[in-house]
Image (cartoon, coloured by chain):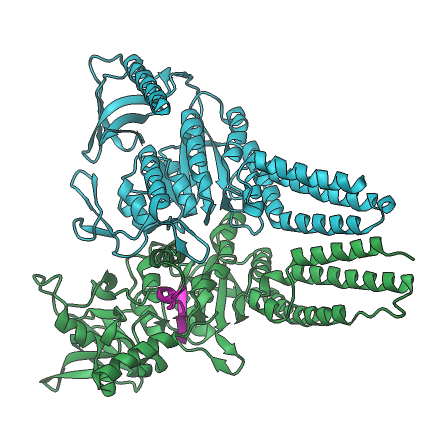
Chain colours: A cyan, B green
């Protein structure tokens, strides 16, 4: 009971903070209107404007959503008369900090999340992690600036991965990247957890070969996630859908076998239906799981367009010029920024760790057994080898704590540390 | 894994037996079943009569109005000596069928092309102009083994070195379970598309990135089944050999059957289809083609609008529309006869005729000369003396030798004997020999690993590299523990 009261107090406090924040927000009561070239009108509060790109906060079914429109999409803007005019220079970013207008083309960086190259790694939660994204932020700010004009394009090539990493990745994208950069997803292949991660990003483009979906959770021999666990993931993805501004029905049809159809009205607005017949376009059939390709995603306006090269992407994003930061490197289609260079190296190392962790563990066990079978005076060299193997494991799991969960079923970093300490003690005991 | 879907055939047979009419199976034509049972989606549309010219292998030419058409037959209203009649022709007897001809007009030189292949439509004919350097690559052998990324990449590099303007890849991938038995159209291995994904970036990423002037890439197809089917589909310019076939993906609806939960199996099918559709779209083709090639329950038909093929989901309802694949259910399940004769329509296999009708193939040609004519470069091309033949041969020979070497190394490893086991030097020498053999295995695996299938490795007990490392470390520990 005491706990409940404390929770209620905490909730009330949060509500108060949130309410106060709304009252203090400069544009809280403003109703701005953006009339798109296709006739659609979007009402809400304009929260950011950069080079003709407009971010507007709207509410859909009581849930706040932020939508972004390119200069090519916007027909006219009707600003709320009572609100302070939003000047073009300087403007306020979503976090309230001023954006400094710089001359020249905006800077952009490609950050790959996964790769088709063998051994380069593409698993969410292993080679694609919230940790990695956080580590890159200072490097990206160094290269793209902190004026809010920088663009980060996540080029996503992943067949999925660990459920536990999705929320973490989504949080970093939502709370760190989207506040600092125009954040874009360029889908090469986003299957399962990779699609669920990308779903927090409003602005999605596809490569011609791109695919996106098949988000059904399962374990072992294709045993579906069920009951409360499934309900929890469905709910998580409803919230992440709101972050990206997507109708939650889309992700639901990617997660479970429910049909989906839609109708695009004369104003270009897409209306979604969780059945196979209400909409004019059948998006997902009965008893199937949805995976978009570039064509189906573009047709229902899930994708903003299809680009094979960074030049094509630049045009789709509404720019005549972009300054893609980084150096041309052999074997890469786009310039490699410092952040991307770090990213590739980290991913390679983590991928190697993943491959070799079992080897290190086997080596440790063998060396430990060898030491134990030796007389005390000759154990030292085996113990040294065992300790070296243990250190390799420690480094690998330090770089990627999820390996501890995957390989040793250790849920937290504390458990992992305790496990290492126990192994160290075993080695010390052998020397006694 | 090759799936020849015995369970589906058994299901078909069981259904027929249950009805007590085995013979009926062969009589129920999917097309007739559909026209009677399916409501017309476009009942209000009155179609203009469509004319056709059929040139038969015998040399006979007929022209007339199409009355009806199926995959194998065409019924035409013709007029001979002033007498009008309707005659049904077997398409197999036709050398060429030209649609939407004006009665009495000359045969149009250009075949019909789909309007959904923008990339294909952009390539101009080149009957005049400066000489074009033509580089030729033969892709023959097993897909994923002889036909694999390293030699293809090397050949493409050689083409660049030779300043090729046009690269022709003749693809005739072996599709057999053993050297004596070619697999039929209804054999399938969808998952081999993931092997193709190691190769396609050469065409979709590397050439666009590394060639300043983009070469014209042409695939000439003799056989591209299972994983090999995806390879040419990433390129917009394809020609078929008259015996050409592209397919072998038809087991997707049955993949993982009996394992786990329904919608997880569906997830697996959906993501696989997403991959395959993506590559087909990258080549500028309609993704629904690959869906029809892969999913037995998918119904796809084609109609011709202004001479251009237009795919639509569902059954034909108008004359001139052609069913490509039915729903593969109940009476629509392909009969044994249809499967044996490759005339079934549960899933789509592109042959020369269908590929051309659908605009996937620009033309059907059986010789290099005909191909160059079809490409419009017969008068302007110049063969460049590339090394592609040596590159492909040297890879194939090397692979064959690598397989033999691995088998021998495995055998040698087991054969290492220690003379006088009580002698420390002999034990040390034996361990050294074992480590050397294991290192040699690693070397061969690194060089040839891309072409050694998991199945081959398992059948021959060749461990993965990480296990070899483990074994080497274990031997080193034994050595450390050993005493003189």
Q: Front-most of B291 and A370?
A: A370
User: Total number of numbered labels?
Assistant: 0
Please say if B410 is above or below A383: below
Q: Front-most of B429 and A88?
A: B429
Please indicate, yes or no, whether residue A143 appears anywhere in the rendered image. yes
Please say if A90 is above or below B212: above
Q: Position of residue A157 (x, y in %)?
A: 46, 46
Give the side of residue A103 with respect to residue A377, left or right.
Answer: left
Say if the magenta span includes residue B248: yes
Q: Residue at x 59, y 64 (%)?
A: B451
Q: Which residue is drawn at 44% across and 29% down?
A: A177
Give the side of residue B212 with respect to residue B274, left or right.
Answer: right
Q: In which quarter of the image is residue B366?
A: bottom left
Classify the position of the C terminus of chain B by image quarter.
bottom right
Please indicate, yes or no, whether residue B95 appears anywhere in the rendered image. no
Give the side of residue A296 with respect to residue A190, left or right.
Answer: left
Q: Position of residue B292 (x, y in %)?
A: 31, 65
Q: Position of residue A426 (x, y in %)?
A: 72, 41
Please say if B119 is above or below A49: below
What range is drawn magenta here? Answer: B238-258
Say if the magenta span includes residue A328: no
Q: Which residue is drawn at 40% across and 73% down?
A: B245
Q: Front-most of A230 and A326?
A: A230
Q: Front-most of A164 and B40?
A: A164
Q: Which residue lies furthest to the front in this view?
A: A1
Q: Where is residue B340 in the image (x, y as percent from the top left)?
A: 36, 82
């Amino acid at each position: 009971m005491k706990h409940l009261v404390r929770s209620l107090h905490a909730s009330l406090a949060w509500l108060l903070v949130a309410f106060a924040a709304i009252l203090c927000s400069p544009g809280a009561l403003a109703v701005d209107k953006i009339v798109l070239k296709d006739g659609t009108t979007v009402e809400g509060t304009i929260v950011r404007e950069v080079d003709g790109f407009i971010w507007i906060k709207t509410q859909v079914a009581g849930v706040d959503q932020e939508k972004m429109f390119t200069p090519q999409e916007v027909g006219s803007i009707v600003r709320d008369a009572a609100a302070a005019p939003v000047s073009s220079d300087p403007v306020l970013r979503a976090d309230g900090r001023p954006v400094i207008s710089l001359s020249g083309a905006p800077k952009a960086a490609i950050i790959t999340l996964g790769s088709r190259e063998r051994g380069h790694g593409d698993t969410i939660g292993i080679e694609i992690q919230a940790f990695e994204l956080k580590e890159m932020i200072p490097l990206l700010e160094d290269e793209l600036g902190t004026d809010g004009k920088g663009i980060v394009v996540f080029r996503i090539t992943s067949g999925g991965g660990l459920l536990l990493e999705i929320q973490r990745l989504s949080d970093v994208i939502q709370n760190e990247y989207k506040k600092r950069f125009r954040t874009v997803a360029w889908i090469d292949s986003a299957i399962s957890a990779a699609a669920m991660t990308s779903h927090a990003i409003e602005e999605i483009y596809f490569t011609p070969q791109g695919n996106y979906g098949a988000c059904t959770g399962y374990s072992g021999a294709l045993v579906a996630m069920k009951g409360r666990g499934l309900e929890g993931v469905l709910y998580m993805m409803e919230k992440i859908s709101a972050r990206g501004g997507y109708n939650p029905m889309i992700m639901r049809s990617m997660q479970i076998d429910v049909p989906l159809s839609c109708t695009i009205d004369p104003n270009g607005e897409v209306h979604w239906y969780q059945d196979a017949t209400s909409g004019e376009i059948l998006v997902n059939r009965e008893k199937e799981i949805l995976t978009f390709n570039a064509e189906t995603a573009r047709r229902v306006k899930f994708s903003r367009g299809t680009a094979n090269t960074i030049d094509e992407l630049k045009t789709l994003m509404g720019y005549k010029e972009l300054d893609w930061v980084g150096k041309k490197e052999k074997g890469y289609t786009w310039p490699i920024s410092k952040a991307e260079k770090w990213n590739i190296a980290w991913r390679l190392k983590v991928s190697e760790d993943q491959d070799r962790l079992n080897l290190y563990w086997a080596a440790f066990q063998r060396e430990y057994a060898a030491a134990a079978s030796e007389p005390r005076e000759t154990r030292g060299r085996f113990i040294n080898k065992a300790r070296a193997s243990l250190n390799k494991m420690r480094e690998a799991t330090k770089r990627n704590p999820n390996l501890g969960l995957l390989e040793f079923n250790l849920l937290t970093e504390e458990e992992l540390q305790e496990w290492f300490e126990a192994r160290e003690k075993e080695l010390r005991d052998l020397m006694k | 894994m090759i799936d020849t879907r015995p369970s589906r055939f058994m299901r078909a047979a069981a259904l027929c037996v249950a009805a007590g009419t085995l013979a009926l199976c062969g009589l129920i034509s999917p097309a007739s079943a559909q026209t009677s049972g399916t409501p017309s989606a476009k009942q209000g549309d009155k179609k203009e009569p469509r004319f056709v010219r059929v040139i038969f292998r015998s040399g006979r030419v007929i022209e007339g109005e199409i009355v009806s058409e199926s995959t194998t037959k065409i019924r035409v209203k013709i007029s001979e000596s002033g007498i009008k009649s309707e005659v049904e022709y077997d398409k197999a007897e036709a050398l060429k069928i030209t649609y939407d001809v004006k009665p009495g007009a000359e045969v149009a030189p250009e075949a019909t092309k789909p309007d959904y292949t923008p990339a294909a439509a952009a390539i101009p004919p080149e009957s005049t102009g400066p000489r074009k350097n033509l580089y030729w690559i033969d892709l023959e052998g097993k897909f994923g083994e002889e036909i694999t990324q390293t030699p293809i990449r090397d050949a493409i590099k050689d083409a660049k070195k030779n300043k090729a303007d046009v690269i022709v890849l003749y693809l005739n991938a072996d599709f057999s379970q053993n050297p004596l038995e070619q697999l039929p159209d209804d054999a399938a291995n969808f998952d081999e598309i993931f092997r193709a994904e190691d190769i396609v970036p050469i065409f979709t990423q590397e050439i666009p990135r590394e060639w300043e002037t983009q070469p014209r890439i042409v695939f000439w197809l003799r056989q591209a089944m299972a994983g090999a089917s995806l390879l040419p589909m990433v390129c917009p310019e394809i020609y078929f050999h008259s015996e050409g076939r592209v397919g072998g993906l038809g087991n997707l609806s049955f993949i993982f059957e009996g394992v786990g939960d329904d919608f997880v199996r569906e997830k697996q099918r959906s993501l696989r289809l997403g991959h395959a559709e993506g590559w087909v779209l990258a080549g500028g083709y309609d993704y629904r083609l690959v869906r029809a090639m892969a999913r037995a329950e998918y119904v796809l038909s084609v109609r011709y609008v202004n001479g251009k093929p237009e795919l639509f989901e569902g059954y034909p309802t108008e004359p001139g529309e052609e069913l490509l694949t039915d729903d593969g259910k109940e009476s629509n399940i392909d009969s044994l006869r249809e499967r044996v004769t490759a005339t079934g329509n549960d899933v789509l296999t592109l042959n020369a005729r269908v590929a051309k009708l659908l605009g996937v193939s620009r033309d059907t040609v059986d010789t290099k000369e005909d191909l160059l004519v079809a490409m419009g470069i017969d008068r302007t091309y110049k063969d460049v003396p590339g090394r592609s033949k040596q590159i492909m041969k040297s890879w194939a020979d090397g692979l064959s030798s690598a397989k033999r070497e691995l088998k021998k190394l495995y055998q040698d490893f087991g054969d290492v004997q220690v003379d006088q086991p009580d002698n420390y030097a002999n034990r040390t020498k034996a361990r050294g020999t074992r480590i050397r053999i294991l290192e040699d295995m690693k070397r061969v695996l690194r060089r040839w690993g891309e072409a050694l299938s998991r199945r081959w490795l398992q059948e021959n007990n060749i461990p993965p590299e990480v296990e070899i490392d483990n074994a080497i470390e274990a031997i080193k520990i034994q050595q450390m523990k050993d005493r003189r």
